[in-house]
Image: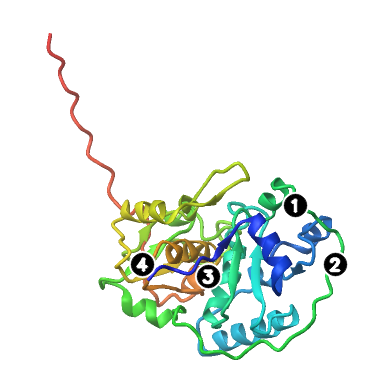
């Protein structure tokens, strides 16, 4: 079974807006939003900023917060939700975080603008500075998808055949920094024991309209470099579930069927001293090879 197509181009979004109910959600900060956005877009920065924990209380708060916010943005279940950010490589996967949250909440129609606002502008499509007035709706209470991992789920998976995939930036992976918000933002630096690593940027490539997602075959090839196949059970994490959402979308589009995310990620894991972490370089430096003598 092929994966549902989540990514949408600027031209496809413009056509969709003209033919069916669409709620476009801008995940950028308010100051950037007011300078220019896709006409009719609703600004919902909390898609990116909300920090979640994986306790029952934390997940309940996550669900209620976004059911309320997305309902206020106009999502009733009948509309297609389309998330965007400025550019796919500059917002830490924030539009994809919206896609992941709606996937978890069971929402049926979700898209992400491939290339973001930069691609929309590059395509010569209209830009507005007028704030939209959304029609509030009751967000539907639907069966939730099995894509959310708790701290306990991850702890149980350590040392098993489950692939733990860390997609953070290199300084976080090697333990030089605890987060994108500063080296010491979180109390501990390091990674989940036994995790594999593919930096989230590697699932994107340049285009004439700015960075876009790689094709499904290219995504599978990137995963193969870390020994990960579409048949594996993959548990994703980053710092707070944004960059891992970018990877979640990439893997789902590439046909990976058993993919879940530890949304609390390093922000939660690092704050519990009882949980194991791995530090230092993940492998020993190669031994110095002796110089080869050249034949006379």
Under circle 3, the secondary element is helix
Which of label 2 and label 4 is nearer to you? Answer: 2
Q: Could you tell me how far apart the alpha carbons at marks 3 and 4 are, in whole angstroms?
A: 16 Å
Q: Tell me the crowding category of disc 1: few under 14, some 14 to 19, or many 20 or more residues within 10 angstroms, Cα based.
A: some
Please name the residue that numbered disc 3 is placed on.
267
Residue at screen point 12% across, 13% down:
295
Q: Could you tell me how far apart the alpha carbons at marks 1 and 2 are, in whole angstroms?
A: 17 Å
Q: Could you tell me how far apart the alpha carbons at marks 2 and 4 are, in whole angstroms?
A: 41 Å
Q: Could you tell me how far apart the alpha carbons at marks 1 and 3 are, in whole angstroms?
A: 38 Å
Any mark on residue 125, and which?
Answer: 1
Residue 72 or 199: which is nearer the viewer?
Answer: 72
Under circle 1, the secondary element is loop
Under circle 2, the secondary element is loop
Residue at screen point 45% across, 53% down:
215
Give the vertical position of 26 relative to 174 (above or below).
below
Give the vertical position of 102 relative to 239 (above or below).
below
Please name the residue that numbered disc 2 is placed on.
131
Q: Could you tell me how far apart the alpha carbons at marks 1 and 4 are, in whole angstroms?
A: 40 Å
In primary-sequence order, the first of circles 3 and 4 is: 4
Under circle 4, the secondary element is strand
Residue 263 or 86: which is nearer the viewer?
Answer: 86
């Amino acid at each position: 079974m092929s994966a549902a197509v989540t990514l949408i181009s600027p031209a496809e979004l413009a056509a969709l807006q003209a033919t069916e109910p669409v709620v476009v959600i801008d995940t950028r900060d308010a100051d950037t939003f007011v300078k220019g956005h896709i006409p009719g877009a609703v600004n919902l920065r909390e898609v990116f900023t909300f920090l979640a924990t994986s306790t029952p209380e934390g997940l309940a708060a996550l669900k209620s917060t976004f059911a309320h916010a997305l309902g206020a943005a106009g999502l009733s279940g009948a509309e297609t939700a389309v998330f965007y950010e400025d550019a796919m490589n500059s917002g830490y996967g924030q539009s994809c975080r919206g896609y992941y949250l709606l996937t978890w909440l069971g929402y049926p129609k979700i898209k992400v603008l491939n290339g973001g606002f930069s691609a929309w502008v590059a395509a010569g499509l209209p830009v507005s500075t007028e704030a939209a007035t959304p029609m509030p709706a009751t967000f539907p209470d639907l069966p939730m998808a099995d894509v959310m991992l708790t701290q306990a789920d991850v702890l149980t998976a350590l040392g098993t055949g489950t692939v733990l995939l860390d997609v953070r930036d290199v300084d976080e992976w090697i333990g030089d920094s605890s987060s994108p918000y500063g080296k010491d933002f979180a109390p501990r630096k390091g990674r989940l024991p036994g995790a594999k690593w593919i930096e989230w940027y590697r699932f994107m490539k340049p285009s004439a309209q700015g960075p876009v997602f790689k094709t499904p075959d290219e995504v599978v090839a990137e995963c193969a470099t870390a020994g990960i196949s579409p048949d594996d059970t993959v548990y994703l994490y980053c710092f707070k579930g944004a960059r891992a959402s970018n990877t979640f979308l990439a893997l789902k589009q590439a046909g990976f069927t058993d993919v879940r995310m530890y949304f609390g990620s390093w922000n939660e894991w690092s704050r519990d001293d009882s949980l194991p972490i791995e530090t230092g370089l993940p492998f020993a430096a190669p031994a110095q090879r002796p110089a080869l003598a050249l034949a006379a």
